[in-house]
Amino acid sequence: MPQFLNTADTDFEARFTHLLGQKREDAPDVDAAVAGIIAAVRERGDAAVIEMTARFDRLELTPETLAFSEAEIAAECAKVPADDRAALELAAARIRTYHERQMPEDASWTEPSGAMLGWRWTPVSAAGLYVPGGLASYPSSVLMNAIPAKAAGVERLVITCPTPGGMVNPLVLYAARLAGVDTVYRIGGAQAVAALAYGTETIRPVDKITGPGNAYVAAAKRRVFGKVGIDMIAGPSEILVIADGTSDPDWIALDLLSQAEHDESAQALLLTPDAAFAAAVVAAVEARLETLERRAIAGASWSVHGAVIVTRDLAEAAALSNRVAPEHLELCVAEPEVLAEAITHAGAIFLGAWTPEAIGDYVGGPNHVLPTARSARFSSGLSVLDFLKRTTLARMTPEALAAIGPAAERLAISESLEAHGLSVRARLDRANGNGL
């Protein structure tokens, strides 16, 4: 059974604060091991990657077989059933359309003084996407990472996807083809992240690494940040549902379980002002757990990390949700757009009872790579912007420099940066005819 809280209880604040601070990951101390892996890849390149792939993934490779050949990709793609192809193609089209609309515009303007200012956007040159392998591989994650990169104009796009024991998911390779990925490497773990960041004899380094992974992958992304950009350090999945009692309790139960089944550390929260409805949802969850294929995982998540909170009203529920800053937020209420106006912190919002979070995982269009562990307070989900850089532009004329240059010179003097001030003064003197 989940935790039960009521905002009317005298101990609610203490219990809610404890819920917010609850550790949801049993993360071993892997940093030292990852540091060694990265050092080995930097020192020995292909040899280190091949050695670790044999050790961890039980797969013997050579420099020539680190990447799938075009013939291998074609053969695997041919195995994808027609219905799965159609579903992936629909998802890819919707994701592409949504992300192409995110492209920002360049801008420039000329001030009355004659100064021209502005900015322009350019893509990173190369991006590497990490995709978990084996049975846990998700073709939807390939689309969600690769399509925004392509929409941004990234020239070279590669994937690292481990194939433990040679196990390949044809759907992942078909998704990579749909998204325009150039190369798919059959390697994973911290060694794959290191190879993407620093390069090897065979693997060219990239500028940005995105995509989910285990604790070793997360630790590696932390360590290579600065050498390359990364998207985020993702934690366990989470969902928060605000419901007013007008929805089907079984629908809400399934929505909660859709995230609980990801991982025993996932979190599912229900906030509602209707105590009877809350009880009905809990009963529906328990009934669904009797037959759910991943009931052991979902049940552990629900019993250890799940919570049901009865609030005074929907406004209070929204305020509490903002404190949680959930990855996924469902507003299963009569007027979801109105309630959404009160939401300031959420990775993604799903409006109304007919919009299950699972639609966002696959075919909705917006990205499903979202901030977790309350980081929606200060960050956003993956987008085209993650693969773009903004460069500012400035051009002075003699008149513009005469208008604003003296202030720059004065500030440089105040900071004891003599050459700064002189670089401006030399031009001012020339403009005034004193330097001729």
Image: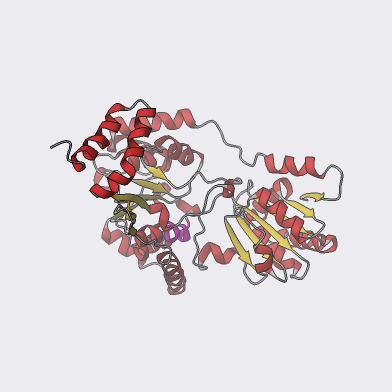
Q: On the rendered structure, is 288 left or right of 409?
A: right
Percent x, y of residue 109: 33, 59
Q: Quadrant of residue 250?
A: bottom right
Is the C terminus in the top left, top right, bottom left or bottom right quadrant? top left
Q: Nearer the viewer, residue 307 or 385?
A: 385
Asked whether 269 or 112 is in front, the reply is 112
Q: Position of residue 184 (x, y in %)?
A: 33, 53
* Residue that appears at 51% across and 68% down: 363
Q: Is residue 350 left or right of residue 35?
A: right
The spot of residue 269 in percent (x, y) is 71, 54
Main SS category, magenta section? helix
Q: Where residue 217 sits in the image (x, y, percent)?
A: 46, 41
Please determine whether, in this image, residue 237 is positioned above or below residue 258. Answer: above
User: Which residue occupies the foreground of this view, 40 or 75?
Assistant: 40
Residue in view at x 61 percent, y 46 percent: 374
Q: What is the magenta range?
A: 138-145
- Would residue 365 be counted in the magenta stretch? no
From what the image shows, is residue 9 above or below residue 179?
above
Give the image quarter of residue 423: top left
Residue depicted at 52% across the width and 58% down the height? 368
Would residue 206 be visible to someone looking at this image? no
Q: Residue furthest front?
A: 433
Of the pair 166 and 343, the residue shown nearer to us: 343
Q: Which residue sits at x=17%, y=40%?
A: 433
Residue farthest to the left, as pictured: 436
